[in-house]
Amino acid sequence: MTRLREWDLGTEDFAREAGLVGRILAVEASRHLSSRARRVRTPLEETEGSSLARLVCLVPVLRAGLALLEPFRELLPEASVGHIGIARDEHTLEARIYVERLPGNLADCEVFLLDPMLATGHSSAAALSVLKKAGARPEHLKLVCCVAAPEGVEVLNQEHPGVEILSAALDRKLNERGFILPGLGDFGDRLFGTI
Ligand code: URA
């Protein structure tokens, strides 16, 4: 996280470090997934193993959430993937959804919403509403981020109580333009070199 925050970290290094954070988040997010017993035959004998009890769906919020998608797929290769595209109005900071492509069985899935920067909370809240409308259950929904601002956490706790938030860092506050302090700047721009 400290490397990710460095102002002069280039695009290639930023993507690599974000991938490392993503792997750690994937392990933490998966820690409490329920499993069921499964017999497995080793070369020597049969023994008790386990597999995931429920389906998993990964939903990156475009663009920044794409940084977390591959690390999560490495750990959960059988997961389905939905996409939500949200643009933030730079003046009102309101969220506008421009892409929504989700699997039809969200009600049966553990859903991980991948949205690296929880700032005002407007876009994550809008994405969670889309997921719930598509059938996802709050108790099986988790928001995964790299940096969260207290303001965003409060908005989500009010608008989506029961949805767990997993964040690599909880920062100090938002500035007047809705950026997280100390934060790391615009995650999507830094990831894709569009600064
Ligand atoms: N989105 C970002 O990418 N960075 C912030 O600081 C806030 C929202």
Image (cartoon, grey):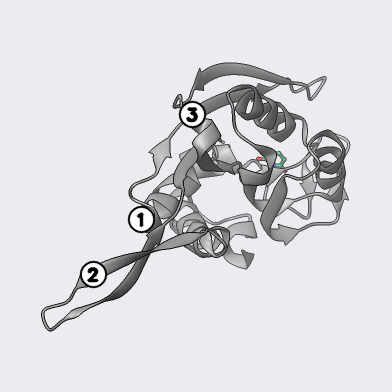
Q: Position of residue 13 (x, y in %)?
A: 45, 57
**Count of numbered labels shown in the rendering:** 3
Looking at the rendered structure, the kind of residue marked 3 is His
Would residue 195 be found to the left or right of residue 176 on screen?
A: left
Mark sitting on residue 74: 1
Q: Position of residue 61 (x, y in %)?
A: 56, 33
**Crowding at mark 3 (Cα within 10 Å: few <14, some 14-19, many 20+):** many
Q: Note whether 41 is above or below 164 in the view shown.
A: below
The residue pinned by badge 3 equals 83
Between residues 110 and 40, which one lies in front from this camera angle?
40
Judge depth for marks 2 and 1 and give the one in front: 2
Q: Residue furthest left?
A: 43
Q: Note whether 64 is above or below 13 in the view shown.
A: above
The residue pinned by badge 2 equals 40
Looking at the rendered structure, the kind of residue marked 2 is Val
Q: Give the SS element for disc 2.
A: strand
Q: Note whether 96 is above or below 154 in the view shown.
A: above
Q: CA distance from mark 3 to mark 2?
A: 34 Å
Residue at x 64% of width, y 40% of height = 186
Quadrant where the C terminus is found in the figure:
top right
Looking at the rendered structure, the kind of residue marked 1 is Glu
Would residue 19 be found to the left or right of residue 125 on screen?
A: left
Q: CA distance from mark 3 to mark 1?
A: 18 Å
Q: Note whether 90 is above or below 74 in the view shown.
A: above
Between discs 3 and 2, the one toward the N terminus: 2
